[in-house]
Amino acid sequence: MFEKILIANRGEIACRIIETARRLGVSTVAVYSDVDAGAKHVALADEACHIGGAAPADSYLRGDRIIGAARATGAQAIHPGYGFLSENPEFVEAVAAAGLAFIGPSADAIRKMGLKDAAKALMQEAGVPVVPGYQGALQEPAHLAQQADAIGYPVLIKAVAGGGGKGMRRVERPQDFAAALSSAQNEAKTAFGNDVVLIEKFVQHPRHIEVQVFGDGTRAVHLFERDCSLQRRHQKVIEEAPAPGMSEEMRAAMGTAAVCAAEAINYSGAGTVEFIVDGSEGLSQDRFWFMEMNTRLQVEHPVTELITGIDLVEWQLRVAAGEPLPLSQDDLVMSGHAFEARLYAEDVPKGFLPATGQLSHLRFPDGCRADSGVRTGDEISPWYDPMIAKLIVHGETRQAALQKLSQALQRVEVAGTTTNLSFLGALAGHAGFAAGEVDTDLIARDLNSLVITHRPTAVHKVAAAMTALDLFELSQDAGFNLWGPLRQSVTLVWQGQPFLAEVRVLSQTEQLWQVEAQELSIHFKNQRWECAGQALPVTHKADDKITVFAEYGYVFDLPDPLARDVENAADTAVIQAPMPGLVRGLFVEVGDTVAEGDRLAVLEAMKMEHALLSARDGTVAEVLVREGEQVEAGAALVRLEDN
């Protein structure tokens, strides 16, 4: 076993690797960018090395600096985690040339699976079923459109060097192909430096089922399947293992195909073979096709760990250190069911826009595994993926595990940034999902019912008001003044709607509140504040915001009564950046006439493209930025003439 390893990554996965390394007695070296100097993974590691600026290209993608840090600290091996350099064959070769071990597959294996078109051809030769499509070198738009016509709509455009849904577009009609192709190629060029795409048939009622494989360079085993069908824009949201509705016969067939794929390239380490499955008539052995292979550890690997009892990172370290596979296929068994939900800083009602901000409070409930790379006080940076945590649960049955997931999501406490917590809760409670009726279109199909805005009750408002007036804490002199019960009031705002809350503090343990014509009696009993026998929810105050941890969290603003509102938030003449990002495209000039809904600019943030549309008809008065310019959230990009 290695004595010291360097982790060429950040965030949640770096912390996850450190956890296993520490248990095995292996020392760890973290690397960090300018903005990550105080990050959780840096604090957890035994040593840490600064490798550059905030942008990934200046730090986490600088293989030379990472290798230099490994040599300077005496690390014997480099673990790439996932993302960044984890599937870069040139980096693998450079690691080997420096006399270090790479904790992952060979450069040759990564190359064979790195380009989707070549990988599909290789899988066909190995006897693995593949989806009908075009993977040719000729990339002229007209030729690609002809191929799409021949395959038959709907089709899927996919970047050959892609991953994580980037450079991927679904096209329903021939007339939409050209625009979708251009958008996919631009996004792929930005994310991967390669705009080559393939075209494949889009499977109706598709399910995304993947098989975890592990090889030692000669033979391979599989650790069963995961269902990753709950996706939005090809990004996984909730994953589970095993796949609902899976028969033993189909599991064996998919497992055999996945092992065949791994052994065909002499695969070493952890990998995932992804299949697209036609779920229109249930799962069938003749309706699954190879989609791609991820030559690294997957984000969703914990669900496999929970149903098998195996630490996949430990296996990675052992195999990379020259040890044989710890278990044979016959030794591998699974037990129960597991779910993983990805908690992100993102604004769901605004189209899942990535969010930033400082986490003023973060607490995960007991009874679930929470893999996180951030803590209370940490900043969600615009430079990297906005994941806050992965919440993973295990139960004896799928129903029991799903109930645990739902309960865990309800008890998460997070404040300081907008999250997708309520959306995850709605998914966990979706009737079709609970019944195992999953496919990759479920979220898009039922989006309106999943993006629900809960409204706070009078109890929630009282909890916020008590926090604002510091009335949660018992105090000997809080209840009275010289003339009788203390009366106080406070104005709070929820989603732009102000309300007045008034209180009479009758005693140290009794308060009478008036909120919007409702009267509530609050008592301190059983070491807690109660209303009608029910405990008031937990709250948190940071600056002028109060979060009430109920129904995934209500955020109330505490306005300064002396402040004056000098901004017109409803100004539709100015198109602003909804988040920090890079201006990837501008489509108007001064004097252009635009209509409501016209695309004015494209902002690239979190490696995704976001179109900015005109809020009304008008004439362009000013274009305030240039293509390629980095802008902050709220920056004015385009101004229309006043009506």
Image (cartoon, rainbow, N blue to C red):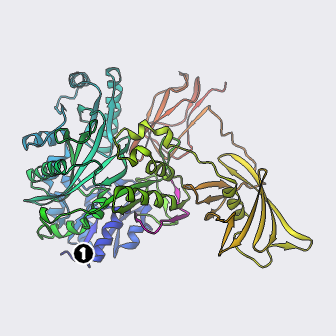
Residue at x 47% of width, y 36% of height: 626
How far from the left and from the top, in percent, is residue 98? 17, 65
Q: Residues within 10 Å of mark 1 (few under 14, many from 20)?
A: some
Where does the image place residue 17, in percent across and percent down from the top left?
Answer: 30, 67
| Residue 133 image-quadrant placement | top left
What is the quadrant of residue 118 in the picture? top left
* Front-most of residues 191 and 94: 191
Residue 363 in the image: state x and y as whole percent: 50, 66
Q: Can residue 10 be seen here?
A: no
Instruction: State whether residue 555 is above or below residue 597.
Output: below
Q: Which residue is mark 1?
A: 4
From the viewer's perspective, tell me whether residue 291 is left or right of residue 579.
left
Would you say residue 183 is visible in this rendering? Answer: yes
* Region of the chain picked out in magenta, as a range: 356-371
Secondary structure of the residue carrying tag 1 is: strand
Quarter of the image with the C terminus is: top right
State the residue at coordinates (24%, 31%).
201
